[in-house]
Amino acid sequence: MPFDPTDYSVVVKLRAPPPNPWRWEIYRAGRANAVEQAPVFFPTMAAAGRAGKVALKQLLDGRAAARGSVLWGLRPPVGPIAKPN
């Protein structure tokens, strides 16, 4: 199945009592469980959302590179990169 970055989304949820109740979670379409979630809690929904967007970008960049996604035009390195003399 080809890699499609639009299958992934960030959701911010209220998961703990104050003062830091918010956590971001990344979901993939068609899946009930989160693919990734914040290791820490945030004081505001906005802060959790901003951090979640950064985490989603990192996740998508890593998955696209690992799969050599045609959509992103990336291929993982096959061996050591030779430096020109």
Image: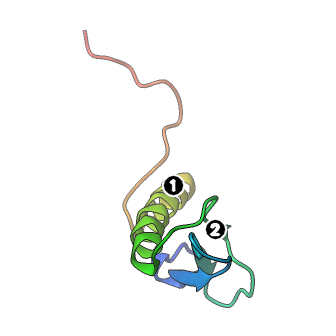
Res 61 seen here? yes
| Front disc: 1 or 2 | 2
Give amino acid for label 1. Gly
The residue positioned farthest toward the left in the image shown: 85
Q: Quadrant of residue 37?
A: bottom right
Q: Which scheme is used to colour this image of the protein?
A: rainbow
* Above or below for 73 versus 78: below
Quarter of the image with the N terminus is bottom right
Give amino acid for label 2. Gln
- Decide: few, some or many residues near mark 1? Use Cα within 10 Å; few <14, some 14-19, many ≥20: few
**Of residues 33 and 1, which is closer to you in this image?**
33
The residue indicated by pointer 1 is: 62
69 with respect to 84 (left or right) = right
Which secondary structure, mark 2? Answer: strand
The residue indicated by pointer 2 is: 37
Q: CA distance from mark 1 to mark 2?
A: 16 Å
Residue drawn at the location 71% of the way across and 86% of the way down: 31
- The percent position of residue 55, horizontal first and vertical second, equals 48, 62
- The percent position of residue 17, horizontal first and vertical second, equals 67, 77
24 with respect to 36 (left or right) = left
Quarter of the image with the C terminus is top left
